[in-house]
Amino acid sequence: MSSKKAKYVFITGGVVSSLGKGIASASLGLLLKKQGLTVSVLKMDPYLNVDPGTLSPFQHGEVFVTEDGAETDLDLGHYERFLDISLSKLNNTTTGQIYYKVIEKEREGAYLGKTVQVIPHVTNEIKQRIRDVESDQGGVDVVLVELGGTVGDIEGLPFLEAIRQFKLEMGRENCINIHLTLVPFIKASGEMKTKPTQHSVMKLREIGIQPDILICRTETQLSMEARQKIGLFCNVPHEMVIEGRDVSSIYSVPLAFEEEQLAEKVMKLMQLPYSRAHMKEWRGFVDRLLNPPEEITIGIAGKYVDLRDAYKSIIESFVLAGEANGVNVNLRWVESERIEDEGAEKHLEHVSALLIPGGFGERGIEGKIDAVTYAREHDMPFFGICLGLQCAVIEFARSVCGLKKANSREFEEVPVDPIIDYIPEQWQITRKGGTMRLGAYPCVIKKGSRAYECYGSERISERHRHRYEVNNDYRDILEEHGMVLSGLSPEGDLVEIVELPEKRWFLAGQFHPEFKSRALKPHPLFSSFVRAAYEYQKEKSGKK
């Protein structure tokens, strides 16, 4: 479909955070895409940080990096995986970005003679960011706009006011509001409670926004009586009260929404023609994902393992690669500091592969390096991502090349052998926000390597987020001792992929392949790694 003007769907949340607005937005986007519409998504985060790039993973979870190098909210990962699209810096905005722009304009004299205020200047800037998404990539049919946080948060008020104004300006048929809320089941009394939803909608209506559709998160079936009660007290037709019951996989949500006729109701409100979506391929994907014939266990040695959202794209990449290989991937999370204290064998002897993910800082590094040693010496499939590559190179330099004091300049100010060092252009940088090597960069792969076998191509593009790289002064000694630098930047000056070809599967990349996994297109490195882990497990157990 091609429309002259985009339609907008605003998704807000109430009662509590982490109800799944991101998954709901991605699922609705998939259903609308099945209607032949071109869909884009905007995540609006009300925090004052310009972006999440300087936030601790314990504060915010994963930082998702786009092709153009924007450090964004992890929900953009859900959007890309579900919708199979690549997003950009236009698809995530924050209060920090909005105020930064308004203050820049004020300093440039754009508001001369005027008092700069939240209304209209901040709300106008928010509305402009919403419109920018429509014009990106030549225009889209539908823009889904998700607002982070919950209704009632003080920092979200300017965004809600902008949404109210936007709907008034664009017309009801061009803008609809979906409110995601909680309908808890109180086990002690055996009752489902609608009052939290009523209060959440009341707060939204006080701001001037009447939701068109309610999605009610619930553990149990939402009865017709409950739907009618919610509809009556929230001023919403009961048929527009959608059940959002808990499901065993996030990839089941689009199917559950289709059963609830969510897309049909949205299309009707937007005055667009609807036809029953063809969900056969997606349904088959979910069936295979939920009923794998085999199971494997992969260890992840990291430093943020207490908050799994810090590795959200990695988790989903394993889910998708497992589905492609007919296995359920159990992830065993290992705190790298515990490996330092208790040894790698205790934590890794019962896993079938090891992944070292990205991260920053010295804490837990020696544990990660010990884990690499264990995997290499036991010929266990090993996969390193970003910092994981750097740990693999440090370990190889120490254990195989004889450089016992090899280290990274990130962990030691003046290493004897700085085998990992600053990328040259990073030496003079002092500002932390948005200054790393970010976004998509090309890589040239050596024919005959494991990487070439996985990608089937000599030239690839992957997304990056780092300041440090393999020190070119040590490339010769690494190669002399058997490490293959199988992926380089086109100019040959940056090492992108390393391998140990004599091992069954030992590969590490300086980039983040997890950011390019898609629901129906798992990343080739993850797929190959999972397959190797399955073969290793079969060999260990004596299966044929």
Image (spheres, grey):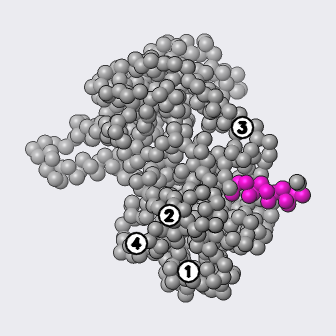
Disc 3 to disc 4, C-alpha distance: 45 Å
Q: Residue at x 66, y 82 (%)?
A: 481
Which residue is disc 3 drawn over? 288
Residue 426 is marked as 4
Q: In the rendered view, does 346 fall on the left or right side of 372?
A: right
Disc 4 to disc 2, C-alpha distance: 20 Å
Label 1 CA crowd tier, 10 Å (few <14, some 14–19, many 20+): some
Q: Residue at x 65, y 64 (%)?
A: 450
Query: Taking 89 as reference, is 195 above or below it?
Result: above
Closer to the chain start, of discs 4 and 2, is 4
Closer to the chain start, of discs 3 and 4, is 3
Residue 443 is marked as 2
CB atoms of marks 4 and 1 within 8 Å: no
In the rendered image, which quarter contains the C terminus? Answer: bottom right
SS at mark 3?
helix
Q: In the rendered view, does 200 fall on the left or right side of 354?
A: left
Closer to the chain start, of discs 3 and 1, is 3
Closer to the chain start, of discs 2 and 1, is 2
Closer to the chain start, of discs 2 and 3, is 3
Q: Amino acid at mark 4?
A: Gln
Q: Amino acid at mark 2?
A: Cys
- Give the x, y percent position of residue 410: 51, 74
In the rendered image, which quarter contains the N terminus? Answer: top left
Q: Nearer the viewer, mark 3 or mark 4?
A: 3
Query: Taking 27 as reference, is 225 above or below it?
Result: above
Task: Please name the predominant secondary structure of the magenta segment in the image.
Answer: helix
Where does the magenta region start and end?
Answer: 529-542
- Give the x, y percent position of residue 259: 61, 21
